[in-house]
Amino acid sequence: MNEVLKNIHARRSVRAFADKAIPRAILQDILQAGLSAPSAMNNQLWQLTAVSNPDRLTGLQHAVQTVLNRPDYGKFYGAATLVLVSVPRDYAHGIADTACVLENIFLAACSLGVGSVWINQFKNICDEPVMRQALTACQVPENHVIWGAAALGYGEPKSATRENKGKLIYID
């Protein structure tokens, strides 16, 4: 099996990260992979905002806790970095483009020994005032929404195996 396929099959979601920063060069490689994702009509309207500052991460966590009324909401599984993928609010292909960016990020992270997991909480709360304030503090444009984010860090998946539940049908 080639290296790309091995990496695809090896990738797992990590939901418990160690308190260890990702070296800037490795993070840069991961983000560049995200920027290399396909997009509708090659628009590439995304912005990737990599947040590693502990105070900013805490600010985002508190905003999510407040807006969702979930005081027990954790700080993105203890990730060292949170990558917010934002696109203009009125962009019809934002969710599809975001998914492509995040998949590239997840695969690149896996290939470099960095764990990852999709963070989904932002999609419906970007324009709540407390959330928008935290996003603005992280330089996310006011006219952007976040369809998904990647929590990145070092950690182990809880399980080394994963059952594929989707269907595969061949029509010859």
Image (cartoon, helix red, strand yellow):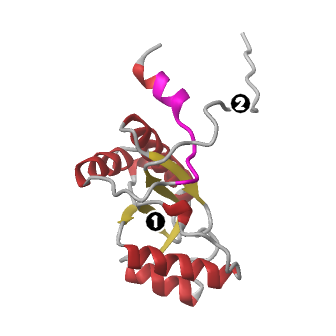
Q: In this view, does 52 lie above or below 7?
A: below
Residue at 47% across, 13% down? 1
Q: Is any part of residue 62 visible from this angle?
A: yes
Considering the numbered disc 2 on the image, is that residue within a helix, a strand or a loop? loop
Q: Is any part of residue 140 visible from this angle?
A: no
Q: Dot 1 corresponds to which residue?
A: 86
Q: In which quarter of the image is residue 109?
A: top left
Observer-side mark, 2 or 1, equals 2
Q: Quadrant of residue 141?
A: bottom left
Query: Residue 171's spot in the image, x, y percent?
Result: 74, 15
Membership of 64 in magenta stretch: no
Q: In which quarter of the image is residue 83?
A: bottom left
Of the pair 119 and 98, the residue shown nearer to us: 119
- Image-based side of 9 in relation to 80, left or right: right
Query: Residue 144: which numbered mark, if any?
Result: none
Find the residue positioned furthest to the front.
Answer: 19
Report the amino acid beneath label 1.
Ser
Membership of 9 in magenta stretch: yes
Find the residue positioned furthest to the top.
Answer: 172
Q: Dot 2 corresponds to which residue?
A: 164
Q: In the rendered view of the protein, which quadrant contains the C terminus?
A: top right
Residue at 45% across, 49% down? 101
Q: Give the range drawn in magenta.
A: 5-16
N-term mark: 2 or 1: 1
Of the pair 34 and 62, the residue shown nearer to us: 62
Report the amino acid beneath label 2.
Asn
Of the pair 14 and 28, the residue shown nearer to us: 14
